[in-house]
Image (tube, rainbow, N blue to C red):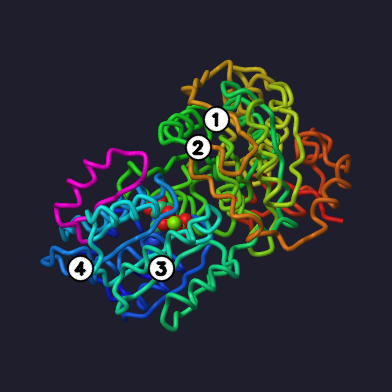
Amino acid sequence: MKFKELGLSEDLLKAVTTAGYEEATPIQAETIPMVLAGQDVIGQAQTGTGKTAAFALPILEKIDKNNPNVQALVVSPTRELAIQTQEEIYKLGRNERANVQVVYGGADIRRQIKSLKNHPQVIVGTPGRLLDHIRRRTLKLDHVQMLVLDEADEMLNMGFLDDIEDIIKQLPEARQTMLFSATMPPEIKRVGVQFMKEPKHVKIKAKELTTDLIDQFYVRARDFEKFDVMTRFFDVQSPDLTIVFTRTKRRVDEISNGLQARGYNAAGIHGDLTQKRRTQIMNQFRHGKLDILVATDVAARGIDINDVTHVYNYDIPQDPDSYVHRVGRTGRAGKHGVSMTFVTPNEMDYLREIEKLTKVRMLPLKPPSDEEALVSQLGAAKDKVTDLVNKTDTEKFAKTAEALLNEFDAEDLVAALLNDLTKDDSSQVPVKITPERPLPKRGGKRHGGGGYHRGGGNHRRNGNGGGYRQRQDRRGGDRDRHGSRSHDSRNHGGGDRNRHSNNGGRRSEGGRGFTIRKKD
Ligand code: ADP
Ligand code: MG
């Protein structure tokens, strides 16, 4: 749904465009009009679905910028989330010069008191520090018209329920209350009943990972090995339409440049590119003019493409939810998909965490050797040559062909052709990816990571209780150890090669459809 249709002012629509949001997410599309209409709203949608803007935009629309009182209060569970939320509201409200301040514990209170004197209209804060300011009378809440309890399930997990009640007691009765959460345990519903007025419930169904349709693999590799290992997998698996996810913008640039240098049809998107450029690249990808899209999680957020055959997690995501988002880009609309996750030796705990959430065990794959990659490439090149021979009108080229045959050996000519049809390998075009700081070693505890990892528990599962077992049983199935059907030349004439290829005819001439093992 377009933001334009939601009843927001021009200033806000501009800010939304500047932020790079093309379309409203489902939770935004449903809740923004309700909040604008003055209703109390309980919004439930999984992590990363844009709940912040769902309340930030209508708040910014409704506050009176000429009124110096605090008119909206957002309660956040952690310092990190409070800061992020303040930043997002500030960013979206910049055109209107909305004054948004954040308060959280563990930081100099005098500085916060000073900033509270600057007449903020919107306050974001963690419960403890908010109460602290209330008690010191450095924060006056008697003009608050809108209250948001954000990430309510997390606040509950952290034992903030009493604090929240104390805060709510300071607010005017006549106010609008919104509650946002990824999950909805009964205690939260009780908060809704107790402190809200006939709240409207909006629940966006979590996208389920259609795990039956996605073969999920992992590959152990050191950081500096990943690029070469990945390209060798490309050669062996011949993916059709691929997204490569990575952690940083710099990596997006380096990997897409490296892939181009090796002869792959790849491009990267991240937040530093202009909206126009991003749209351009997305359209190329959507229309199959680009084989490989390299992206950060954030840049890939709006991507809605059905034919993605492979997702490569060049860097394992820190948050298991992100994994589900990433991998959910493939295996759509009843088609098969493959996901490959690279894991450095010290990141194995992250892998296990993901498996806990998805209830699916990823199968380990051994990196193919350069030799094996070449064999696969040559197989594909041979197919391509066969295809070319079949569709070439020999008559037309006979004269030049004869001239070339007079000059060169037939074998040399064909070898040159094959060389042209295969990608350069690491020895011909070395690519070096700048090392990034590895993920912190996991403590094992849910909230121990220091960041704001929100486990979210079992709110999203694959709905397939047998998934785990089934996967285990399939170990040692007929798949070879690179996750593809054997790509040696014997198999190449075989008619069954494209049995499950997802290319929908788009690239049939290249024969690059990757065959996925038939499910039994
Ligand atoms: P949640 O609170 O649901 O976990 P956030 O509000 O933190 O999610 O949003 C996650 C990310 O999505 C943020 O980086 C945000 O800037 C981005 N985002 C929000 N709305 C949109 C949109 N309509 N289109 C694209 N990205 C969006
Ligand atoms: Mg949020």
Distance (Cα) linking label 3 and label 1: 33 Å
Q: Position of residue 279 (x, y in %)?
A: 37, 53
Distance between the Cα atoms at labels 3 and 2? 29 Å
Q: CA distance from mark 1 to mark 4?
A: 43 Å
Q: Which residue is mark 2?
A: 450
Residue 28, label in figure: 3
How crowded is the residue under tag 3: few (<14 C-alpha within 10 Å), some, or many (20+)? Answer: many
Q: Secondary structure at mark 4?
A: helix
Camera-near label (2 vs 4) is 2
**CB atoms at circles 2 and 4 under 8 Å apart?**
no
Above or below: residue 207 compared with residue 31: above
Q: Which residue is mark 1?
A: 440
Q: Is residue 238 left or right of residue 314?
A: right
Q: Nearer the viewer, residue 410 or 149?
A: 149
The residue mark sitting in front, 1 or 4, is 1
Is residue 302 visible from the viewing direction of this image? no
Return the x and y of residue 424 as percentages of the image width and height. 57, 24
- The amino acid marked with disc number 3 is Gln
The first of marks 1 and 2 along the sequence is 1
Does 112 lie within the magenta span? yes
26 in relation to 215, above or below: below
CA distance separating discs 3 and 4:
17 Å
Check if mark 3's residue and mark 1's residue have beta carbons within 8 Å.
Answer: no
| Range shown magenta | 99-121
| Quarter of the figure with residue 395 | top right
Label 3 CB sits under 8 Å from any ligand 1 atom:
yes
Tell whether circle 2 marks a residue whose Cβ is less than 8 angstroms from ligand 1: no
Query: Circle 3 — which element?
Result: helix
* Inter-mark Cα distance, 2 to 4: 39 Å
Among the two numbered marks 3 and 2 on one chain, the one whose residue lies closer to the N terminus: 3
